[in-house]
Amino acid sequence: MTEKTTSPVRGDTLAHTTLKPMRLFVGLDIDDPIRQRIQRFMEGVREFAPDARWVRPESLHITIKFIGETPPDAVEQIKTALSSIQADSPEIIFRGHGFFPTPKAARVFWIGIDSGPQLAALSRAVDDATHTLGIPKETHPFSPHLTLARGGGGSGAPRRVKGDSPNRNFQRLQEKLASLPAPEFGTMASREFFLYQSQLSPGGSRYTKLERFALR
């Protein structure tokens, strides 16, 4: 799932505030050994897409649901809603890679994620819990992936959007990857998920964990 740029929070349900809104999302962290393998992979290929905006390895995560701009005094309501979730720990396999929305009009370079039904069930549970606060449900199927780089401007959504056109942002990278075997980064079992705050900066987004929620 990809972070959006507009806030889906309906102000008639969540509390209002005059303080600066917080950009929130729900996600999973990545085990350090897998993060280190991905970092080495990125270091080996990023020179083939030097103009892309690469994610800092320490910021890698799996987005479960992007909430958007939220009043600070609504954060506790969201934490309470998420704490009610009873979900099983998903096993997640990181392997392969691809480009959104298509290789010829690529905006996002990503690593593939394979998982059983538990991850999709967690996504539905988060969607249901936050919907009780007036946060709209997702309108597209859950598509887990790990974003490594974004080429140019525009949306990071996996589907086609207005303005998509053929580009060369990732052409050299695609040519390089075509000559290499599909990478395998490892398997992990997520024992917890988090409510994150995303803060935009010139050097890229910075993510802060606001609350931890255990999985069974």
Image (cartoon, rainbow, N blue to C red):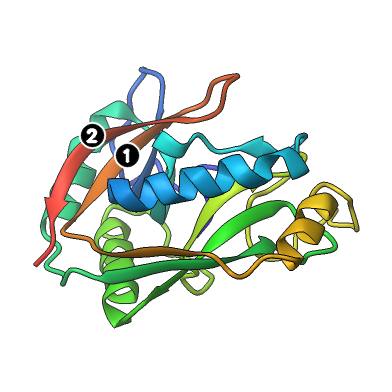
Q: Earlier in the sequence, mark 2 or mark 1?
A: 1
The local crowd at label 2, few if under 14, some if 14 to 19, many if 20 or more residues have their Cα within 10 Å, is: few
Marks 2 and 1 sit apart, C-alpha to C-alpha, by: 6 Å
User: Can residue 12 be spotted in the picture?
Assistant: yes
Which percent across, then down, holds residue 56?
50, 34
Give the secondary structure at mark 1: strand
What residue appears at the point 91 percent right and 58 percent down from the top-left corner? 166
User: Can residue 29 be spotted in the picture?
Assistant: no
Q: Of residues 178 and 214, which is closer to you in this image?
A: 178
Q: Of residues 215 and 44, which is closer to you in this image?
A: 44
The reply to whether callout 2 and callout 1 are in contact (CB within 8 Å) is: yes
What residue appears at the point 19 percent right and 54 percent down from the top-left corner? 82
What residue appears at the point 31 percent right and 50 percent down from the top-left corner? 33
Per the rendering, the mark at residue 210 is: 2
Residue type indicated by callout 1: Tyr
Q: Of residues 94 and 8, which is closer to you in this image?
A: 94
Residue type indicated by callout 2: Leu
Left or right: residue 154 compared with residue 23 = right
Which percent across, then down, holds residue 128?
28, 66
Which percent across, then down, holds residue 191?
16, 59
Which percent across, then down, holds residue 104?
85, 63
Q: Quadrant of the C terminus?
A: bottom left
Per the rendering, the mark at residue 87 is: none
Vertical relation: 91 (above or below) 126: below
Pointer 1: what residue?
A: 196
Vertical relation: 123 (above or below) 51: below
